[in-house]
Structure formats: C-alpha cells, structure tokens
Image (cartoon, rainbow, N blue to C red):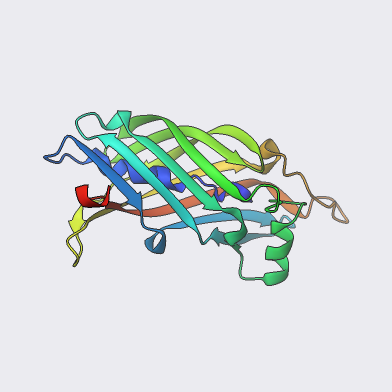
Amino acid sequence: MSARTLTALTLAALTLLAPRPARSANWEIDPVHTSVQFSVRHMMVSNVRGQFDTVAGRVEADEANPTAAHIEATIDAASIDTHNQKRDDHLRGHDFLDVAKFPTISFVSKKVEKAGNAKWKITGDLTLHGVTREVVLDVDGPTPARKDPMGVMRAGTQAQTKINRQDFGISFNKALDGGGVLVGDEVAITIDVEVARKTEAAR
C-alpha cells in the first residue's frame, strides 16, 4: 500500500507546462493542500483507502521547455493514515512499510511527455521500502496559475498510477478459507497536488 508513494510531487512540475513570461521557475509543494491517497483490496471483497499526511517536494523547470522539468518528492512513511490506529500501526511495522528502517518514500522524475490535451505522462524512480522501481504517472492539468491573497502564484494538478507492492518487497499476506488472500497486491494511487511558485527572495 506504500504506493502512496509517492510519487505525488511530480505533479507539481506540470504547473510549469502553462506558458508564462519568465523562462524558468521554481515551485514547492504546499503540503497543506496536497494529498497522496491510495486504495487496496481487502479480503477480495472491499477496498481499504488511506493517505499519507506529510509530503514535501520541489520542481525546477525551464518554462520554454516543460518536458525538461525536474521533480523531486519525499513522503514521510510514518504519516500513513487509514483512519484505524491498529491497522496503521501494523502498516508502519516490518510486515509492510517498516518505517523504522525505511522512514521515507521518494520520487525523482526522469522524463515528462505530453499525452494529449492537458494530459501528461511523468516517468520517474519511486523508492519505497528500500527498493527503487520505475513508475509512470498519468497527469491531468495543470490548472491556470492564480495569485493567492499573499501574492503567491499557485497551481494544481492530479495524477494517478498503480503499483504492485510485491515489486517493492512488501509481501505480507494471509490465505483465506475458501480461497483468496487478505490483502491485494495492486495499489491504486491518486495524487492531488498544489504548488506555490518561489520568489527570488525565498530562493
């Protein structure tokens, strides 16, 4: 389920895809308005949903060449929240995320490609549970940038992907009577991200 991976800050880069006067820009993810959500099958009959509450990241891009954007994102693995304390403690333990040994989940982009009208694909390396695998994010957006009451430019986008937790060495499971398993392998991830443009003074 660790998929929450991450992955999310990568979307930030997409805000750079909208034309602006400046050639280059730096953006930071706003953790208060960003969410990394995931869903995984439980006992083959329902979906358990959760999210990671602590995300940080940055985007560096040349706005004249948006496909050259570079995105880095980090998630605090211990911030996982499925609205059940006992389950969250289990997910943080060695059967799943093992946050004592692997405290963060990270994503580093390698390629940004246009995939249609207001659609993009971002390929990058996701490091989860100490294992690094290539993943592809399907992105919608970004929204037009808008100035907040403090004068900071902001934009948002959404991305989705799926991963197999087995690919990251997270293999805990239990067989069910009559067939099937307790936890599904496929993890669906949805990332809603808001980024704020850094000013020269803040750099």
Q: Residue furthest right?
A: 177
Q: Is residue 42 left or right of residue 39?
A: right
Q: What's the residue at 45%, 32% (across, down)?
A: 123
* Image position, residue 29 (x, y; %): 37, 52
User: In this view of the protein, which residue sits in the foreground, 7 or 120?
Assistant: 7
* Image position, residue 191 (x, y; %): 45, 52
Q: Quadrant of residue 76?
A: bottom right
Q: What's the residue at 63%, 61% (across, down)?
A: 48
Residue 25 visible to an observer of this rendering: yes
Q: Quadrant of residue 165?
A: top right
Count of numbered marks: 0
Residue 144 visible to an observer of this rendering: no
User: In this view of the protein, which residue sits in the foreground, 29 or 121?
Assistant: 29
Q: What's the residue at 58%, 61% (across, down)?
A: 79
* Image position, residue 179 (x, y; %): 84, 50
Residue 186, relative to residue 50: is it above or below?
A: above
Q: Residue furthest left?
A: 21
Q: Is residue 170 left or right of residue 136?
A: right
Q: What's the residue at 70%, 49% (across, down)?
A: 184
* Image position, residue 71 (x, y; %): 39, 38
